[in-house]
Image (tube, grey):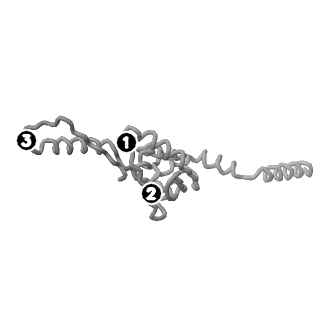
């Protein structure tokens, strides 16, 4: 995966003929274990992208928080190999090259698999990766209380209707 190591064994034990090769194998295994190849999916999972859903039921186990899963649109492959100590730097670079556009309002109810947005990842060296962001679970809406229902209906009426009703009442009072 693009990692090259050189192993030098000086003064390796001479207890048996292949001791220097065992030491070299151990050193190389240790060296290669210090590197990890991260895929797009692994880096995205490390972000743990969640969004709050308003109007969620009080019984919702996660408090209305939904995790967004990324479904890659095309067969773009993104892999990068780095030292394990550089994982945070790599994640920050991943975030910097990521563009997220939300296309759905975050109001309950939400069904599992609802498309909530789009993601574009444009690495400095590599192919652009696009994906859709979908909700990982259902979120049911909180029940609407009758008083809240009337209030919500009244808030939806345009202001010009109230003005027209006011003039109509004023006209009726003048007639009486």
Most distant residue in the front direction: 11
From the top left corner, tell me how far across and down residue 110 is, in percent: 50, 54
Which residue is label 3 attached to? 16
Q: Specify whether residue 33 is in view.
A: yes
Among the two numbered marks 3 and 1 on one chain, the one whose residue lies closer to the N terminus: 3
Label 1 close to label 2 by CB (< 8 Å): no
For the residue carrying disc 3, how many other residues have a C-alpha within 10 Å: few (<14), some (14-19), or many (20+)?
Answer: few
Q: At 25% across and 40% down in the image, what residue appears? A: 8
Cα separation, mark 1 vs mark 2, equals: 36 Å
Say what secondary structure mark 2 lies in. Answer: loop
Which residue is label 1 attached to? 83
Among the two numbered marks 2 and 3 on one chain, the one whose residue lies closer to the N terminus: 3
Among the two numbered marks 1 and 2 on one chain, the one whose residue lies closer to the N terminus: 1
Nearer the observer, 105 or 26 = 26
Cα separation, mark 2 vs mark 3, equals: 62 Å
Q: At 54% across and 45% down in the image, what residue appears? A: 96
Label 3 close to label 1 by CB (< 8 Å): no
For discs 3 and 1, the disc positioned in front in the rendered view? 3
For the residue carrying disc 2, how many other residues have a C-alpha within 10 Å: few (<14), some (14-19), or many (20+)?
Answer: few
Most distant residue in the right direction: 174
Which residue is label 2 attached to? 112
Cα separation, mark 3 vs mark 1, equals: 34 Å
Side (left or right) of 54 relative to 173: left
For discs 2 and 3, the disc positioned in front in the rendered view? 3
């Amino acid at each position: 995966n693009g990692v090259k190591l050189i192993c030098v064994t000086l003064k390796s034990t001479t207890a048996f003929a292949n001791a220097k090769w065992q030491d070299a194998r151990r050193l190389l295994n240790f060296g290669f274990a210090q590197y990890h190849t991260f895929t797009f999916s692994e880096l995205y999972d490390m972000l743990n992208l969640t969004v709050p859903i308003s109007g969620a039921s009080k019984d919702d186990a996660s408090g209305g928080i939904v995790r967004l899963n990324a479904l890659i649109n095309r067969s773009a492959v993104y892999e990068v190999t780095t030292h394990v100590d550089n994982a945070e730097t790599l994640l920050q670079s991943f975030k910097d090259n990521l563009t997220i556009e939300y296309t759905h309002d975050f109001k309950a109810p939400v069904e599992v698999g609802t498309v909530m947005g789009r993601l574009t990842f444009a690495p400095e060296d590599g192919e652009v990766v696009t994906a859709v962001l979908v909700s990982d679970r259902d979120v049911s809406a909180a029940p609407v209380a009758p008083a809240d229902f009337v209030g919500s209906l009244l808030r939806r009426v345009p202001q010009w209707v109230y003005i027209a009703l006011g003039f109509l009442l004023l006209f009726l009072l003048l007639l009486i």
